[in-house]
Image (spheres, coloured by chain):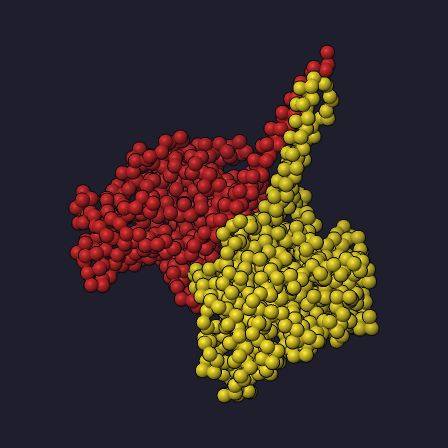
Chain colours: A red, B yellow
Amino acid sequence: MEFAELIKTPRVDNVVLHRPFYPAVEGTLCLTGHHLILSSRQDSTEELWLLHSNIDAIDKRFVGSLGTIIIKCKDFRIIQLDIPGMEECLNIASSIEALSTLDSVTLMYPFFYRPMFEVIEDGWHSFLPEQEFELYSSATSEWRLSYVNKEFAVCPSYPPIVIVPKSIDDDALRKVATFRHGGRFPVLSYYHKKNGMVIMRCGQPLTGTSGRRCKEDEKLINATLRAGKRGYVIDTRSLHVAQQARAKGGGFEQEAHYPQWRRIHKSIERYHILQESLIKLMEACNDQTHNMDRWLSKLEASNWLTHIKEILTTACLAAQCIDREGASVLVHGTEGTDSTLQVTSLAQIILEPRSRTIRGFEALIEREWLQAGHPFLQRCAQSAYCNSKQKWEAPVFLLFLDCVWQILRQFPCSFEFNEHFLIMLFEHAYASQFGTFLGNSESERCKLKLQQKTMSLWSWVNRPCELSKFTNPLFEANNLVIWPSVAPQSLQLWEGLFLRWNRSSKYLDEAYEEMVNIIDYNKELQAKVNLLRRQLAELETEDGLCESP
Amino acid sequence: MEHIRTPKVENVRLVDRVSSKKATLGTLYLTATHVIFVENAPDTRKETWILHSQISTIEKQATTATGCPLLIRCKNFQIIQLVIPQERDCHDVYISLIRLARPVKYEELYCFSFNPKLDKEEREQGWMLIDLDEEYKRMGLPNNYWQLSDVNRDYRVCDSYPTEVYVPKSATAHIIVGSSKFRSRRRFPALSYYYKDNHASICRSSQPLSGFSARCLEDEQMLQAIRKANPGSDFIYVVDTRPKLNAMANRAAGKGYENEDNYSNIKFQFIGIENIHVMRSSLQKMLEVCELKSPSMSNFLWGLENSGWLRHIKAIMDAGIFIAKAVSEEGASVLVHCSDGWDRTAQVCSVASLLLDPHYRTLKGFMVLIEKDWISFGHKFNHRYGNLDGDPKEISPVIDQFIECVWQLMEQFPCAFEFNERFLIHIQHHIYSCQFGNFLCNSQKERQELKIQERTYSLWSHLWKNRADYLNPLFRTDHGQTQESFHLPTAPCNFMYKFWSGMYNRFEKGMQPRQSVTDYLMAVKEESQQLEEELEALEERLEKIQKVQLNGTKVKSKQSEPSKYSGFSTSDNSLANTPQDYSGNMKSFPSRSPSQGDEDSALILTQDNLKSSDPDLSVNSDQESGVEDLSCRSPSGGERAPSEDSEATSQRPYEPTTSLIPKYNIVQSVG
């Protein structure tokens, strides 16, 4: 298919762009296969480049022959284009609509994007499972890499390489896979070096109403416990929901069959409930009325912070089991691809200092989200302004990032990255020139040959010039477990993300700059002092040498 | 002392607010000024000091098997729950505290016994730190349009005003006195702030006694004079900060508001800020929300909305914004009043001044602002904050709201203020503590009669002395945001009004961010300063040596010292990164009572332990707990006592049910 077929009017002059906090810009609007571009003739005014895939919804209206298109983006931005001429406006609108909802993944921008920067390190190879496993294998010999899924035959949503208990062979894994939702047998998510406790994750057991068992499953799970130890199964669904799942062939671990495990039910919401929550939240954030009660009541009604609290609480609980109770944890919900990953990855942020560094956090996203088979393509297909409301769309990853931000706010010196890093990840998960977040699983990514055909986000991010933007100047390595507060008083709306298009960030940016200045100045002084000390020391030894004979 | 029925009760338990199961055993002491709880634990002997003047309510709850619970709520939002073994002791403590918390004479207040060991001269200098004459000079007064009037000498015209006020030059004594007779409590229009740049001014007064039709020529002339004092504008705004309905109701009582027809060239404007009774009950409702035990997010947000607190904060801020805009953008003078002109008017004038003038965003400038708009113009501190026993209907968090407005601004303009959040919290604390004389009484006149300056100390000099604690590391004098007046949006989605947990939940430290950016940056700045000094010294030495070498002389020099500065960040880190404690060690907050360490010999138990006289817990308590290592030391190892385990989960359990291991009882029924 040619993009040209979709572009009815490639170019319109005298279009006026309106954005909050910027003066209106008049210029020429161009449509390309992947971008909407507005450039003014003045050199000083920056151009607008908007990826079609970033467009969530558009509205159009007409006053006489002047058409207006309101573009609502997945990154929550809302811009307005005034286009002279009804026909041009209609053409542009329908082109945008078509181009922003392309069916085929391979038509998306990452497949066409040619990087203008030099790749120092290929991000596709930055976080190989073997390397990640080496970090553990030095500390324990109880686990092994399994290649049982190398053709994606055992579990379509798992990566080819997973970490499993050493004592369990691949045949057993195959059997366990038939007993777990989506073939997602229990695999290692995190190994707590301090005490050898682990977090594992999987899909729900397929017990059904008849109470099916699977000896291999029981054996696998017990193989992760040390002698005399007990573990916890954290089911991210309420007991009621878990019980209902039995009617559809799912279920949960029966206490009788897993006597060394105790089950805890939490209820983390899923799917459209989360999507609606996001939609309502953005409605509140875009409400320009000056009414305090209305704002608070809309914020409350969105339930966004309720979800944040629930997810964080569950993650803290998992971390608490590991670090405080010295008990291993198995986490699952239904599929084990959403709330499960929120919990396992946040628990690692709390427990593991490495995951609070930039590379460690990237590795965590690679491991616990991409490789673990979070269906990014489905979940992030639409954002807060969409009308389509497909069942599989949900801001699961965004909620995770928000939870990380909440912890970052409470421990502002313990993270190597800053808020901008989290916002950047959010943006790229929804619309990107990079292939990293394309597809729903490793197997889909393999089929799409992303490694060969697209650029990895990490290749771009991990260059020093980009990293400097995402580095938290306050960072001081902190090897402690960090326990966030989950009291409502401690959780806040993530203004930097949700309100960023609705208020000027000028003053907060200035504050950030000032913070960087203070710390840079300190470093500079330190360097100078050290240099002088060395010089002095040298001079003095020379002195001493001359003196000694 | 005659009110203390029992000075000491042993085996009292201080119950932890977060998990009621946990309590520390200790001894309770009642002194003339404080309630003191001393833990029994021999290694810590942690003390909790509560000033009587901070006590807001005391509640005796139903006796249980373990004893008789006593709940003390403080005006600085601390809540203390004690369990006293004997009903009789509890009753005695209760009766004593009821009396001690409600002194009837000023002389009973703490400031008359508080002695920071300063000599007379130091005390006098302390009172001279903030000088309003200087402040009006700074504004550019007197000038061709404004003059200092002594019409209120000896408080002859208005007993709640200062003796010296600025009025328009054209306002004769006759006009002022005439106008004062037409205003509630004779609070005639007087200058609050003068905006040099364009001659516009903010004036304040009480409501006119206009009833349904009354007029007063002098009052009309007074407003005319204010208008004429600003050659740049041909009208003035008259802002009535009350809701229109309230103002109209006042007309029936012979009061009311200005009729635009009677005054030439005024633009009259209502701004609906609610009265003190609405505000009192709003705060009450919000505190109930803060007190909820493990509330859900919805409970909390719903309760916050329902309390209306942030709506009121926004209303005050909006009024300030309106006035600041009128002055700076329209160049028009504004006369502000409410009913008596000492609550809402004070709030709104000071918010507007703060928005307009960067000086008020400095440490000293902020003290001046409170001195000017609150203390000198007769804000009724004694009545509003219940320092002496009085009508509970007079109590209202008027200045608390102003302080919160400042905090909300600080959140949005992080570089604009010279001071930090701690400064605001300490001022709030001392408004209630009565440890310093500044906020005593209801007016300047009363303070003069009491000879406050001769008998008590000034808070301002105390804060100034400790100013290093109150500095905002991000403050930069050359920044845009510190130079100009603010231009603020007013929709909640543009200007985020937030719940101030640092104030209202400040004694529940677990809820606060666990690392303080302010403290961290202050430490870095301090280190930079030391490095600068060292750099200078090193350069000097280097130069010397090079000179000496040039001269061919040999001089032995000292071995260069090892770096002294490598350690700040790590120590800072270990302090700040103290994990939220689930093992219960830090549970005993409120650990340090704010008033601890007022080196007041009258009632000291263990004077050496007292460190600072500031109402701050955050500074010391982490050190005290020393818990950061504990919580991370090999948890599976056998070092922890088993009891700690159960505490670990009860701290602020993520799983609200109960402890995890070894009981295994959290699991909901299985299948």
Residue A123 appears anywhere in the view: yes
- Along the line of sight, the residue nearer the viewer: A246 or A378: A378
Query: Is residue A274 positioned above or below A414 on the image?
Result: below
Q: Residue at x 76, y 70 (%)?
A: B451
A188 over B263 or under it: above or below:
above
Residue shown at the point (61%, 40%) measured from the top left: B528
Report the residue that reaches farthest toward the top. A549
Query: In this view, which residue lies farthest toward the front?
Result: B144
Q: Is residue A81 above or below residue A458?
A: below
- Image-quadrant location for residue A245: bottom left
Which of the two residues, B464 or A293, is positioned nearer the viewer here?
B464
Q: In which quadrant will I find the N terminus of chain B?
A: bottom right
Q: How many marks?
A: 0
- Judged left or right of residue B105, residue A30 is left
Q: Position of residue B588 (x, y in %)?
A: 68, 57
- Give left or right: position of A547 versus A386: right
* Picture residue at 63% right of the left edge, 53% below the top: B470
Q: Position of residue B115 (x, y in %)?
A: 79, 61
Q: Position of residue B630 (x, y in %)?
A: 65, 45
Q: Is residue B511 above or below residue B176?
A: above
Residue at position x 78%, y 66% in the image = B455
Left or right position of A333 against B357: left
